[in-house]
Amino acid sequence: MKAWEKNIRTIKHPYVAGYQPKDYSVTKLNANENPYPPAPGVVKAMEEFETSSLRLYPALNADELIDEIAHFKQVKPSQVFVGVGSDDVIGMCFLTYFNSGKPILFPDITYSFYDVWADLYRIPYECPKLDEKFHIKKEDYYKDNGGIIFANPNAPTSIAVGLDFIRDVLEHNQDVIVIVDEAYIDFGGESAVSLLEEYDNLVVVQTFSKSRSLAGLRVGYCIASEELIQALNTVKFSYNSYTMNMLAIKLGAESVKDTEYFYQTIDKIIATRTWSKEQLEQLGFTCMDSSTNFLFATHKSMAAKEIFEKLQERKIYVRHFDKERIDNYLRITIGTDQQMEQLVNALKEILPDEKNING
Amino acid sequence: MKAWEKNIRTIKHPYVAGYQPKDYSVTKLNANENPYPPAPGVVKAMEEFETSSLRLYPALNADELIDEIAHFKQVKPSQVFVGVGSDDVIGMCFLTYFNSGKPILFPDITYSFYDVWADLYRIPYECPKLDEKFHIKKEDYYKDNGGIIFANPNAPTSIAVGLDFIRDVLEHNQDVIVIVDEAYIDFGGESAVSLLEEYDNLVVVQTFSKSRSLAGLRVGYCIASEELIQALNTVKFSYNSYTMNMLAIKLGAESVKDTEYFYQTIDKIIATRTWSKEQLEQLGFTCMDSSTNFLFATHKSMAAKEIFEKLQERKIYVRHFDKERIDNYLRITIGTDQQMEQLVNALKEILPDEKNING
């Protein structure tokens, strides 16, 4: 070991990213990307963008983007914080809001970055277990803690809780910050944004990566009370003043303006989800009740890992987590109708013949 | 005070950004932006960019950009780390490399973010004073410490040190990480990249914001030994896997490819700097010997703050730091020849008449 190595930050459970195929001919249902392109206004803004302006620094406060989000969500611009994807936003939230010596709380099965951020920033944490049906037990969040984060709808389970649940958690946790990560909220959940007027310790995080078809642009945001956003800005501006590049600001703002396209795209995905769930159930899968752009499914007779591998042989990529309690499940992104038909046809080849099993 | 406020991270000296006028008609010489547009290849890449691809996540490792930088710098891709501007890169370096209980060292007059990052991450630090001529005293960096960072050329002084100086600091600091922030190196300094083969504890940081005319795109990078880059990646991927959006990767890569335009632009700025320095000296300024795209200048009879304000009345923006030891200096970005002529003409109006003073 070299002498300087002792000064280097080590992380207990560093994040290891899932495999992302570079071959664009595959059917990619493994990253919860939107199968439809960004709004027409985004394409137009790209065409009209004056590339020479890139010589200048971007707007310090990303005002254009923040103003559009605030207008769309009917909150004040001073209640909105934007970042490089919701990962940047939540990472900044962990650094800013979770400075207690007490453990923060989040479910054992949830977005796989929460424990990584806690490790990175040396924040103690506890992970209450979801119940057998993968539902969050609200009583687990009544105890003394240093802060709370949960995803609604939860990932990778796809299950949403209602506003009564969130209100209950907030009522029991007035002395800490409660973050609701709504990455998938647009596909069927009820947003906690409506609770912001009542609770000044609530932070609601959303993203442009799923419902706005802009994963490649890296834009996420959160909405909270002005005090909380100001605290977040103090930390953010003390890390990097200019996180949002000019294109993220401009194209992001144009995306928010096009509400009609936004809702159309979501409706299409929800319709495809309904069809896909029926098809999978006919093939012997059980799917959680999804409020997201993916299905979380387990098969009655074939192991998830085997299905995952056999799909991959056919160039269809879904997600399998080699993790306790969920290792017999697949997370399947809702693609286009055509992609889902491809998936269903492949599954028909892969799965054991029903008659042989039952007969 | 609300109960939840006690959990919020506070920062002793939070960063407060300088004023950036939104009026594009002003002469903007206050942010060290490049007056020339990005390389023609960048414009072409923008035109050819397939906007629909933004629905997908960007390449996890930003390979295309990293490969071009590695090729240009003649190092291995595994020695290159990219981030959202050099601020993101240095911020990640502080978090990753400065984990000793001992204070890190950097000069009292230097880039104003170093103490902010140290405060943010609760890293102890000491700031040895530059000498009276604003030169770094290498002996100040011989003592026991938790790491070292300095800018070369230094900002806002514009003064560069030679490789012999850096080698000396490295020889005296084999047990800690030494970061050289080369944001302005392309305008006249000698890069420490050539020392990387000898020192595995050296990190060299550069940026696309100045010499590559891409401040608005937010791209910075560092080059170091493979072990150091791996440690940085472990922390970075545990914060945010996808920091570089697709456009930053693509346009950044195209910028690096166009070496001819790169050197042409730099040569033009250096020629304008030479002319501007002569002009300012004729007007009674003393300018530090600049290896950057700005001049650090003080006037023999008029206070810097007064000049700053009078220029601003004429819609010419330069930078003035209200900070001990340098509050009688102006930092003036090198613009186009035309912009510098404008500045010189304005100064002729503003400054006291030489004959009246001497006569």
Image (spheres, coloured by chain):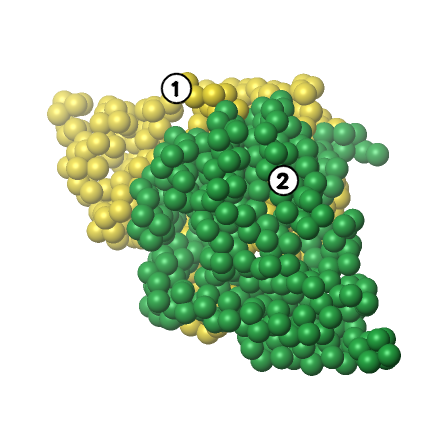
Chain colours: A green, B yellow
Residue at image coords 38%, 68%: A261
Q: Residue furthest front?
A: A359
Image side of residue A11 versus residue A295, left or right: right
Residue at image coords 26%, 27%: B305
Q: Closer to the camera, A193 or B124?
A: A193
For the C terminus of chain A, the quadrant is: bottom right
Q: Which residue is mark 1?
A: B324
Q: Which residue is mark 2?
A: A137
List x then y, in percent, for residue A108: 69, 42
Q: Closer to the camera, B166 or B310?
A: B310
Q: Is residue B271 above or below residue B133?
A: below
Residue at image coords 60%, 56%: A158
Image side of residue B279 versus residue B359, left or right: right
For the N terminus of chain A, the quadrant is: top right
Q: Amino acid at mark 2?
A: Lys
* Circles 2 and 1 on the same subunit: no
Image side of residue A230 versus residue B257, left or right: left
Are the two marked residues, 2 and 1, in contact with CB atoms closer than 8 angstroms? no
